[in-house]
Protein backbone atom coordinates (compact mmCIF):
# COMPACT_ATOMS: atom_id res chain seq x y z
CA UNK A 1 0.00 0.00 0.00
CA UNK A 2 1.34 3.40 -1.08
CA UNK A 3 0.68 6.61 0.81
CA UNK A 4 1.40 10.27 0.17
CA UNK A 5 2.55 12.58 2.95
CA UNK A 6 2.20 16.28 2.16
CA UNK A 7 4.81 18.13 4.23
CA UNK A 8 4.32 21.84 4.93
CA UNK A 9 6.35 24.24 7.01
CA UNK A 10 3.73 24.74 9.71
CA UNK A 11 2.49 28.06 11.02
CA UNK A 12 1.56 29.74 14.29
CA UNK A 13 -1.75 30.50 12.53
CA UNK A 14 -4.07 27.55 13.02
CA UNK A 15 -5.92 28.47 9.81
CA UNK A 16 -2.76 28.02 7.73
CA UNK A 17 -2.21 24.54 9.14
CA UNK A 18 -5.87 23.74 8.54
CA UNK A 19 -5.46 24.77 4.89
CA UNK A 20 -2.80 22.06 4.55
CA UNK A 21 -4.99 19.50 6.30
CA UNK A 22 -7.85 20.41 3.96
CA UNK A 23 -5.53 20.05 0.96
CA UNK A 24 -4.54 16.55 2.14
CA UNK A 25 -8.22 15.64 2.47
CA UNK A 26 -8.91 17.01 -1.01
CA UNK A 27 -5.95 15.08 -2.45
CA UNK A 28 -7.17 11.95 -0.70
CA UNK A 29 -10.55 12.32 -2.39
CA UNK A 30 -9.04 12.94 -5.85
CA UNK A 31 -6.21 10.45 -5.80
CA UNK A 32 -6.35 7.57 -8.22
CA UNK A 33 -5.27 4.00 -7.66
CA UNK A 34 -1.60 4.94 -7.37
CA UNK A 35 -2.07 6.07 -3.75
CA UNK A 36 -4.34 4.55 -1.14
CA UNK A 37 -4.13 7.39 1.33
CA UNK A 38 -2.93 10.96 1.71
CA UNK A 39 -2.05 12.67 4.96
CA UNK A 40 -0.01 15.68 6.03
CA UNK A 41 2.75 16.60 8.44
CA UNK A 42 4.61 19.74 9.46
CA UNK A 43 8.27 20.61 9.77
CA UNK A 44 7.68 23.04 12.64
CA UNK A 45 5.00 24.69 14.74
CA UNK A 46 2.19 22.19 14.08
CA UNK A 47 1.37 18.54 14.53
CA UNK A 48 2.02 15.89 13.45
CA UNK A 49 5.77 16.17 12.94
CA UNK A 50 7.24 14.56 9.83
CA UNK A 51 8.45 11.46 11.73
CA UNK A 52 5.06 11.08 13.44
CA UNK A 53 3.25 11.53 10.13
CA UNK A 54 5.40 8.84 8.53
CA UNK A 55 4.95 6.50 11.51
CA UNK A 56 1.16 6.96 11.33
CA UNK A 57 1.13 6.16 7.61
CA UNK A 58 3.17 3.04 8.24
CA UNK A 59 0.96 2.03 11.18
CA UNK A 60 -1.99 2.48 8.81
CA UNK A 61 -0.54 -0.12 6.47
CA UNK A 62 1.69 1.83 4.09
CA UNK A 63 4.60 -0.16 2.67
CA UNK A 64 5.69 2.82 0.59
CA UNK A 65 5.35 6.53 1.39
CA UNK A 66 6.00 9.41 -1.00
CA UNK A 67 6.81 12.64 0.81
CA UNK A 68 5.72 15.77 -1.11
CA UNK A 69 7.32 18.99 0.18
CA UNK A 70 4.62 21.67 -0.06
CA UNK A 71 7.18 24.43 -0.50
CA UNK A 72 7.77 26.91 -3.30
CA UNK A 73 11.53 27.21 -3.11
CA UNK A 74 14.45 24.90 -2.53
CA UNK A 75 15.67 26.50 0.67
CA UNK A 76 17.30 24.87 3.66
CA UNK A 77 14.03 23.29 4.75
CA UNK A 78 13.66 21.43 1.46
CA UNK A 79 17.33 20.64 0.92
CA UNK A 80 18.37 19.66 4.45
CA UNK A 81 15.67 19.68 7.11
CA UNK A 82 12.96 17.55 5.48
CA UNK A 83 15.40 14.85 4.26
CA UNK A 84 16.86 14.75 7.76
CA UNK A 85 13.44 14.15 9.33
CA UNK A 86 12.66 11.48 6.76
CA UNK A 87 15.95 9.71 7.50
CA UNK A 88 14.94 9.30 11.15
CA UNK A 89 12.03 7.09 10.11
CA UNK A 90 13.94 5.33 7.33
CA UNK A 91 16.35 4.13 10.03
CA UNK A 92 13.44 2.90 12.17
CA UNK A 93 11.72 1.01 9.32
CA UNK A 94 14.32 -0.33 6.90
CA UNK A 95 11.65 -2.46 5.16
CA UNK A 96 9.52 0.55 4.19
CA UNK A 97 10.28 2.57 1.05
CA UNK A 98 10.15 6.30 1.75
CA UNK A 99 10.83 8.53 -1.24
CA UNK A 100 10.98 12.30 -1.55
CA UNK A 101 9.10 13.88 -4.44
CA UNK A 102 10.45 17.17 -5.82
CA UNK A 103 9.13 20.19 -3.91
CA UNK A 104 6.02 21.82 -5.33
CA UNK A 105 7.85 24.88 -6.70
CA UNK A 106 9.78 22.58 -9.03
CA UNK A 107 6.63 21.48 -10.85
CA UNK A 108 6.94 22.60 -14.48
CA UNK A 109 3.16 23.08 -14.75
CA UNK A 110 3.18 25.79 -12.07
CA UNK A 111 3.63 28.63 -14.57
CA UNK A 112 0.60 27.70 -16.64
CA UNK A 113 -1.45 27.20 -13.46
CA UNK A 114 -0.48 30.74 -12.35
CA UNK A 115 -1.54 32.20 -15.68
CA UNK A 116 -4.94 30.50 -15.51
CA UNK A 117 -5.29 31.45 -11.84
CA UNK A 118 -4.56 35.14 -12.41
CA UNK A 119 -6.75 35.34 -15.49
CA UNK A 120 -9.71 33.79 -13.66
CA UNK A 121 -9.13 35.53 -10.32
CA UNK B 1 -1.08 48.14 -20.81
CA UNK B 2 -1.55 45.46 -18.16
CA UNK B 3 1.34 43.94 -16.18
CA UNK B 4 1.65 41.11 -13.70
CA UNK B 5 3.84 41.39 -10.62
CA UNK B 6 4.68 38.07 -8.97
CA UNK B 7 5.36 38.78 -5.29
CA UNK B 8 7.39 36.28 -3.29
CA UNK B 9 8.58 36.37 0.28
CA UNK B 10 12.27 36.73 -0.51
CA UNK B 11 15.07 34.62 0.91
CA UNK B 12 18.61 34.96 2.21
CA UNK B 13 19.43 32.27 -0.36
CA UNK B 14 20.16 33.96 -3.68
CA UNK B 15 19.13 30.79 -5.54
CA UNK B 16 15.61 30.97 -4.08
CA UNK B 17 15.19 34.55 -5.26
CA UNK B 18 16.57 33.58 -8.65
CA UNK B 19 13.96 30.83 -8.90
CA UNK B 20 11.27 33.52 -8.59
CA UNK B 21 12.99 35.71 -11.20
CA UNK B 22 13.17 32.73 -13.53
CA UNK B 23 9.48 32.01 -12.94
CA UNK B 24 8.63 35.61 -13.86
CA UNK B 25 10.67 35.25 -17.06
CA UNK B 26 8.92 32.00 -17.87
CA UNK B 27 5.51 33.56 -17.22
CA UNK B 28 6.48 36.50 -19.42
CA UNK B 29 7.26 34.11 -22.25
CA UNK B 30 4.01 32.14 -21.85
CA UNK B 31 1.61 34.95 -21.15
CA UNK B 32 -1.10 35.63 -23.70
CA UNK B 33 -2.49 38.97 -24.81
CA UNK B 34 -4.04 39.65 -21.42
CA UNK B 35 -0.69 40.78 -19.99
CA UNK B 36 2.05 42.66 -21.75
CA UNK B 37 4.76 42.07 -19.16
CA UNK B 38 5.52 40.05 -16.06
CA UNK B 39 8.03 40.97 -13.38
CA UNK B 40 8.65 40.03 -9.76
CA UNK B 41 9.18 41.68 -6.40
CA UNK B 42 9.92 40.58 -2.85
CA UNK B 43 8.34 41.33 0.50
CA UNK B 44 11.64 41.01 2.37
CA UNK B 45 15.31 40.11 1.98
CA UNK B 46 15.60 40.66 -1.78
CA UNK B 47 15.16 43.36 -4.39
CA UNK B 48 13.10 44.91 -5.79
CA UNK B 49 10.67 45.64 -2.97
CA UNK B 50 6.97 45.50 -3.79
CA UNK B 51 6.66 49.31 -4.09
CA UNK B 52 9.76 49.46 -6.31
CA UNK B 53 8.48 46.60 -8.46
CA UNK B 54 5.15 48.37 -8.90
CA UNK B 55 6.84 51.69 -9.67
CA UNK B 56 9.04 49.99 -12.29
CA UNK B 57 6.01 48.39 -13.95
CA UNK B 58 4.26 51.76 -14.05
CA UNK B 59 7.39 53.48 -15.35
CA UNK B 60 7.45 50.80 -18.06
CA UNK B 61 4.01 51.83 -19.23
CA UNK B 62 1.60 49.75 -17.18
CA UNK B 63 -1.78 51.36 -16.61
CA UNK B 64 -2.96 48.29 -14.70
CA UNK B 65 -0.95 45.90 -12.54
CA UNK B 66 -2.15 42.59 -11.14
CA UNK B 67 -0.18 41.51 -8.07
CA UNK B 68 0.06 37.72 -7.67
CA UNK B 69 1.16 36.62 -4.18
CA UNK B 70 3.43 33.60 -4.72
CA UNK B 71 2.55 32.15 -1.32
CA UNK B 72 0.95 28.88 -0.29
CA UNK B 73 -0.97 30.02 2.76
CA UNK B 74 -2.98 33.04 3.76
CA UNK B 75 -0.78 34.13 6.63
CA UNK B 76 -0.02 37.63 7.81
CA UNK B 77 2.16 38.32 4.77
CA UNK B 78 -0.71 37.67 2.38
CA UNK B 79 -3.49 39.16 4.50
CA UNK B 80 -1.77 42.28 5.82
CA UNK B 81 1.78 42.93 4.64
CA UNK B 82 1.41 42.65 0.87
CA UNK B 83 -1.80 44.74 0.73
CA UNK B 84 -0.05 47.35 2.88
CA UNK B 85 2.89 47.57 0.46
CA UNK B 86 0.52 47.80 -2.49
CA UNK B 87 -1.40 50.62 -0.83
CA UNK B 88 1.78 52.73 -0.67
CA UNK B 89 1.94 52.78 -4.47
CA UNK B 90 -1.83 53.10 -4.93
CA UNK B 91 -1.58 56.36 -2.97
CA UNK B 92 1.27 57.56 -5.20
CA UNK B 93 -0.51 56.72 -8.48
CA UNK B 94 -4.25 57.17 -8.07
CA UNK B 95 -4.73 56.85 -11.86
CA UNK B 96 -3.23 53.35 -12.01
CA UNK B 97 -5.35 50.28 -11.27
CA UNK B 98 -3.51 47.87 -8.98
CA UNK B 99 -5.39 44.69 -8.11
CA UNK B 100 -4.45 41.78 -5.90
CA UNK B 101 -5.00 38.30 -7.29
CA UNK B 102 -5.72 35.51 -4.79
CA UNK B 103 -2.53 33.94 -3.40
CA UNK B 104 -1.26 30.87 -5.23
CA UNK B 105 -2.31 28.41 -2.50
CA UNK B 106 -5.93 29.40 -3.13
CA UNK B 107 -5.85 28.11 -6.71
CA UNK B 108 -8.37 25.26 -6.95
CA UNK B 109 -6.25 23.50 -9.58
CA UNK B 110 -3.35 23.06 -7.15
CA UNK B 111 -4.53 19.66 -5.91
CA UNK B 112 -4.65 18.13 -9.38
CA UNK B 113 -1.26 19.66 -10.19
CA UNK B 114 0.20 18.02 -7.06
CA UNK B 115 -1.21 14.65 -8.04
CA UNK B 116 0.30 14.86 -11.52
CA UNK B 117 3.57 16.19 -10.07
CA UNK B 118 3.95 13.37 -7.54
CA UNK B 119 2.98 10.68 -10.04
CA UNK B 120 5.54 11.93 -12.56
CA UNK B 121 8.25 12.83 -10.05
Image: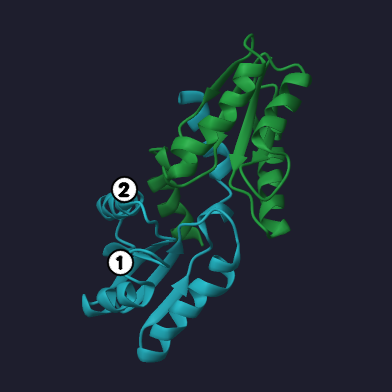
Chain colours: A green, B cyan
Left-right relation of B23 to B99: left
Q: Is residue A46 above or below residue A69?
A: below
Residue found at the far left of this picture: B60
Q: Is residue A103 visible?
A: no
Q: Which residue is mark 1?
A: B47
Marks 1/2: CA–CA distance: 13 Å
- The residue depicted at 46 percent of the width and 57 percent of the height is B70
Q: Residue at x 37, y 56 (%)?
A: B12
Q: Is residue A118 visible?
A: yes
What residue is pinned by disc 2? B15
Write down the chain letter for disc 1. B
Occupied quadrant, residue B114 = top right
Write the residue at 70% across / 48% down.
A46
Image coordinates for residue A15, horizontal then vertical, percent:
71, 58
Question: Is tag 1's residue or tag 2's residue first in the polypeptide sequence?
Answer: 2
Residue B120 horizontal/vertical position (percent) = 46, 24
Q: Is residue A68 above or below residue A87?
A: below
Q: Residue at x 54, y 42 (%)?
A: A70
Amino acid sequence: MKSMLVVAHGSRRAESNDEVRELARLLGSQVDASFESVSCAFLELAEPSIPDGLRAAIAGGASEVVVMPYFLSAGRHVVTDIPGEVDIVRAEYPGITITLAPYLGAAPELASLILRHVQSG
